[in-house]
């Protein structure tokens, strides 16, 4: 028999229950499960994320720096918030004891030998849940040959993801001959957000990036793009955050760096400690000597 209520219980009648807005822009109307997944990717303390992207193999095979993910990538894991990868790598290489959040690629099909925009949805939401991931990633080719198909891939993932509380990351892929400017990225990111993506990955541009982040109603993370000198990559990350990005989803500029661990830690200092690029570069150089 349950005990009868005793006198003297404290219901804190003078304290109203808090009802807080969710910390990420455009995300307040998402369900609890989806918000919780987003909060595993974006740190609720500063709203930023450092994602390590190493999913390139799904269309490029073992590209430079990703020949051995067990050797080259696992040592970087402790310093990032989120791993962006494929399910094959998650199952075969990443220790299940990891507590890092995972963004898993859910689109694919063509290799670099074919038309890249001709992707299909390649991973189900059930598989994503089974792998306990925090979001599914899909490539969107605005202006590409299979633009409509890629947008419909994204919409289908958003439809099913919404049923299960699984966010979708839309990755804006730019064709080789297309102009990479703010006008293009405003178009691409806004279409992804309008079609329901919970967050969007795009590239940084020197001119007008703030118009891209301002006109996109959901969080934006930037890709690193081709390898550039470490200081330039740190400057790019810093400026992107200053101009409204919520994080960095960086691959080649980390794993192709002369010292990937030092570079990961320097980027982390920019993303989470608001370090200026020059300070972070100094840190990179000191750490580089330590790790070499
Ligand atoms: C592949 C991707 C990659 O995850 C990402 O764009 C690569 O990151 P980086 O440009 O920093 O190497 O989405 O299309």
Image: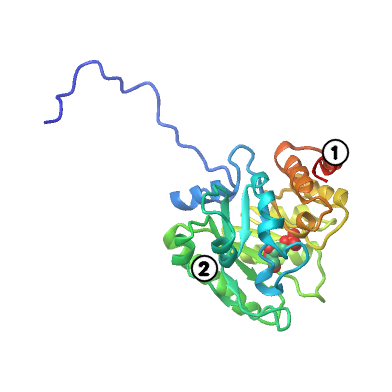
Residue 55 spot, x, y in % from top left:
66, 64
Q: Which mark is residue 274?
A: none
Q: Looking at the picture, does residue 211 appear above or below residue 268?
A: below
Q: Quadrant of residue 56?
A: bottom right
Please name the residue that numbered disc 1 is placed on. 286
Q: Position of residue 240 (x, y in %)?
A: 77, 50
Residue at 80% x, 75% y: name it: 176
Element under disc 2: helix
Which of 3 and 32 lies nearest the eye of the viewer?
3
Give the secondary structure at mark 1. Answer: helix
Residue at 73 percent across and 83 percent down: it is: 113
Q: Which residue is mark 2?
A: 157
Viewer-side residue, 162 vs 182: 162
Q: Residue at x 81, y 64 (%)?
A: 181
Q: Is residue 151 above or below residue 283?
A: below
User: Ligand 1 closer than 8 Å to the CB at disc 2?
Assistant: no
Q: Is residue 120 visible?
A: yes
Crowd rating for badge 1 (residues with CA inside 10 Å; few <14, some 14–19, many 20+): few
- Number of labelled discs? 2
């Amino acid at each position: 028999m349950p005990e009868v209520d005793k006198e003297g219980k404290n219901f804190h009648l003078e304290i109203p229950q808090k009802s807080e807005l969710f910390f990420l822009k455009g995300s307040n109307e998402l369900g609890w499960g989806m918000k919780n997944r987003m909060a595993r990717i974006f740190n609720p303390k500063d709203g930023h994320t450092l994602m390590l992207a190493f999913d390139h193999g799904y269309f490029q095979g073992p590209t430079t720096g990703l020949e051995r993910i067990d050797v080259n990538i696992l040592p970087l894991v402790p310093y990032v918030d989120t791993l962006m990868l494929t399910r094959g790598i998650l199952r075969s290489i990443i220790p299940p004891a990891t507590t890092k959040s995972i963004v898993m690629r859910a689109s694919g099909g063509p290799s670099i030998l074919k038309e890249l925009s001709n992707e299909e949805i390649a991973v189900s939401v059930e598989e994503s849940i089974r792998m306990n991931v925090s979001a599914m990633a899909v490539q969107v080719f605005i202006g590409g040959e299979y633009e409509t198909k890629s947008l419909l891939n994204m919409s289908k993932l958003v439809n099913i993801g919404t049923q299960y509380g699984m966010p979708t990351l839309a990755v804006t892929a730019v064709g080789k001959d297309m102009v990479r400017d703010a006008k293009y990225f405003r178009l691409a990111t806004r279409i992804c957000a309008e079609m329901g993506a919970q967050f969007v990955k795009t590239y940084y541009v020197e001119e007008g990036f703030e118009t891209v982040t301002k006109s996109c109603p959901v969080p934006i993370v930037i890709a690193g793009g081709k390898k550039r000198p470490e200081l330039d990559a740190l400057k790019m990350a810093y400026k992107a955050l200053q101009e409204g990005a919520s994080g960095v989803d960086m691959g080649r500029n980390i794993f192709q760096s002369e010292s990937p661990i030092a570079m990961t830690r320097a980027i982390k200092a920019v993303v989470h400690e608001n370090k200026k690029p020059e300070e972070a570069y100094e840190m990179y150089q000191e750490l580089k000597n330590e790790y070499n």
